[in-house]
Image: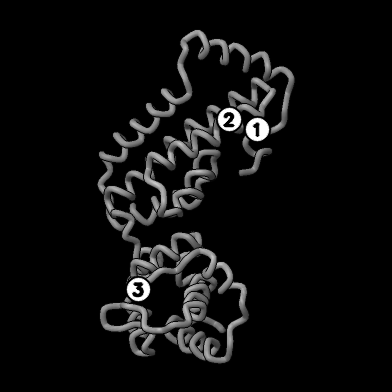
Amino acid sequence: MDHKKLYGRWNFWEEFVGYPMMLYHLIKREKIQERFQRRIEKAKQKSSKVVLNEKLRNEYLIRYEKLDNFFSFHFKDIDTSRNHNFEDKIQYCLDQYKKESNSLISSSNLMKLQGNFLSGAETTLFLYFALQSKTNREIHLSDIMIGENSSKIFIAFLKDKKFIDENHNLLVDQKSSFIRIHRFLKDNHIINPDFQDTTIIEAMENEYNSNFDKGTFSRAITVKPNDFEETIYHEISKLFNIRH
């Protein structure tokens, strides 16, 4: 999270605005936890009214990936872990807020942080709940690839090359090469480049019934492709009219 973007340039006159706001909340004795909880409930209610079609789902996925606020920064970070439930993730974000707020000496910056945290939580969780409840986060290649038949063409290619079986189960042991093939598709805009690697990993796991951890994925895409992979890239380029 870019602190300069969050707090902006400090101006002395802003302190005159910040202190009254702090006093207002102190007088009301309204704790951040209570205001935070109301935002969570509001996000749940709004998301429950959403009817997702495929176009809107993809739009929400992209919006979720592009979120850049204090809450989303920490929530998306811990959301990649499978060892925490939703309550754990919420508490983690709240703890990060408290840690950050305790480090501030400027009342105006505290108000900026609080506003960013609460509004960011509502925006982030609205998209999260909408996607979670409607799609159960079962993202597949068809959700991240550009073109109506791109995923079908690619899956048929993988079956023909014995990368996967008829049920889309991964057959190859070398996951690194397999990962780089998908990165090639992203670099050439066959996989939508607006999606982050975490979303692509999730789509691959659901599509191929296999695990692709973030560390392996990150290391794999930094390695130069070998001759076999270059041959595969050449064949894929013909399928999708890519200049390679």
For the N terminus, the image quarter is top right
Q: Nearer the viewer, mark 1 or mark 3?
A: 3
Q: Look at the numbered discs 2 and 1 and tell me whether their residues touch, using CB distance below 8 Å.
A: yes
Secondary structure under tag 1 reads helix
The residue that appears at 64% across and 39% down in the rendered structure is 5
Task: Point out residue 145 in the picture as x, y percentages from the top left corner.
Answer: 40, 68
Q: Amino acid at mark 1?
A: Tyr
Q: Amino acid at mark 2?
A: Leu
Q: Which residue is mark 2?
A: 113
Q: Residues within 10 Å of mark 2 (few under 14, many from 20)?
A: many
Question: Which of the 4 image quarters holds residue 152?
Answer: bottom left
Q: Which residue is mark 1?
A: 7
Q: Nearer the viewer, residue 210 or 65?
A: 210
Q: Residues within 10 Å of mark 1 (few under 14, many from 20)?
A: some
Query: Residue 143: which numbered mark, if any?
Result: none
In this rendering, position of residue 137 left or right of residue 88: left
How far, Cα to Cα, is label 2 from label 1?
7 Å
Q: Amino acid at mark 3?
A: Tyr
Q: Look at the numbered discs 2 and 3 and tell me whether their residues touch, using CB distance below 8 Å.
A: no
Task: Point out residue 60 in the picture as x, y percentages from the top left corner.
Answer: 39, 50
The residue that appears at 66% across and 27% down in the rendered structure is 104
Secondary structure under tag 3 reads helix
Q: Nearer the viewer, mark 2 or mark 3?
A: 3
